[in-house]
Amino acid sequence: MHRTLTRRAAVLVAVSVVTGASGLSACGSESSNQPSAGGKVAITVTGQPPSSQAVERKIFDADVAEFEKLNPDIDVVAHEGFMDPKTFSAKLAGGQLEDVYYVYFTDPANIIARRQAADITDHIKDMAVIKQLQPALLDIFKDRNGKIYGLPTANYSMGLLYNRALFTKAGLDPDTPPTTWAEVRTAAQKISALGNGTVGFADLSKNNQGGWHLVTWAYAMGSQIAKQEGEKWTADFNNDKVKEALRLLKEMRWTDNAMGDKQLLEATDVQRLMGAGQLGMYLGAPDNVPVLVKEFKGKYEDYGVAAMPGGQGTLLGGEGYMINPKASPEKIKAGLKWIDWKYLAPDRIEQRVKQYLDEKQPIGLPAVPTPDIYTGDTRARQAELKTRNANVPEQNFASYLDGNTKLKGNLEPPNAQQIYAALDNVMQGVLTNKDANVDQLLSEAEAKVNSALAQVK
């Protein structure tokens, strides 16, 4: 499975825990441009799942073995973990950055500007899959001149994750989830009225995750977080649209009492509540669902995901791979062959589905086990394979897929983590203080965000 939203949330506070081992064990890529014994090209790659994700680790390691068998002139040296923005530049400067390295969609612009990735434009001219990738995703890895420095391998968009079982108990139709924020509020009230500690709606508010979700709210209301004029970025969220989102949260929390008394929540808190059947709704994406089942003893049939209510927009995120700028042409070629085969090749979609079936993993969730990054014939074939092999109720996610075709997808803002930290205070204020001054909270956050944006190069 690709990185779940649990991992995306956890990376906001603990990415160094995941990737620290990678940084310590990485061999010096600057000095690794020499071929391996026997004339082989050795490439170091990130992306090996941690041992705690046993199935994902097994599939990854099996893929490495198969790839090396198909390409006997390439040795793949896998490093556990993904990316730690705090140590990235130091690893590059110290010659410890892997030849092929993982990035979030928030990273490529700065990496390209700092010349921390290899230009792969000429190397991918003959890669057939390029024409099947969504152009908007490929654009994330381009510079202003159209040169390409990396490839997208997965994407996601936020939606409304809801408990179908609680919807039914509350007299709501689980097949017609809320499409407006007024409907979300009404549903939250009815679910909370069930009693026994049931919470209608929950949201995150600490460890940068509150800020991450406030960005999601802003996009859902049709606002932006930051705007660029020339080379300068400035905050763009202290407006009526974001204030409306905070008003809605405040009313669900304090007027309706539909969000429960316990606040200062993070991802695992809301997942635990949902898995225990005590939470009606929260903002998330379909890749939360396997976490609810595997880690919190939920059932696939009890969950659904709808598109972000309101019809305005949503937060779009994702991941991809770039190549060390110090890599030799031979390593670049080998690295691209690995990225293409492991993450992109359309002719491996069926194999990936079979791997998941063999391991009794879910088939039928959006983006799992194959990413929703394609267009045209590849996308159609992918959808047909997933439908034919589905072992979870695909219809529970139909409104998410249908609705997303009408929403504007917005990437995370530059210097996202610093912005999220500043916006945490806004979410905390609204959810923990009945008399919170929203204007003051937004003004204080605006000053901090502008300071963070001033550092964007």
Image (cartoon, rainbow, N blue to C red):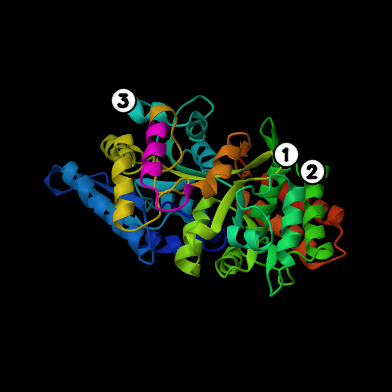
Residue 328 lies in quadrant: top left
Q: Which residue is tagged 3?
A: 126
How far apart are the alpha carbons under marks 2 and 3?
46 Å
Identify which amino acid the numbered label 2 is placed on: Lys
Residue 222 tag number: 1
Dominant secondary structure (helix, strand or loop) of the stretch shown in magenta = helix
Residue 171 image-quadrant placement: bottom right
Percent of width and height locating residue 33: 26, 44
User: Quick check: marks 1 and 2 in contact, CB under 8 Å?
Assistant: yes
Which one is in front, 280 or 233? Answer: 280
Direction bottom: furthest residue: 196
* Viewer-closest of 413 and 90: 413
- The spot of residue 192 in percent (x, y) is 73, 66
As helix, strand or loop, the secondary structure at mark 3 comes to: loop
Q: Which residue is mark 2?
A: 241
Position of 205 relative to 222 (above/below): below
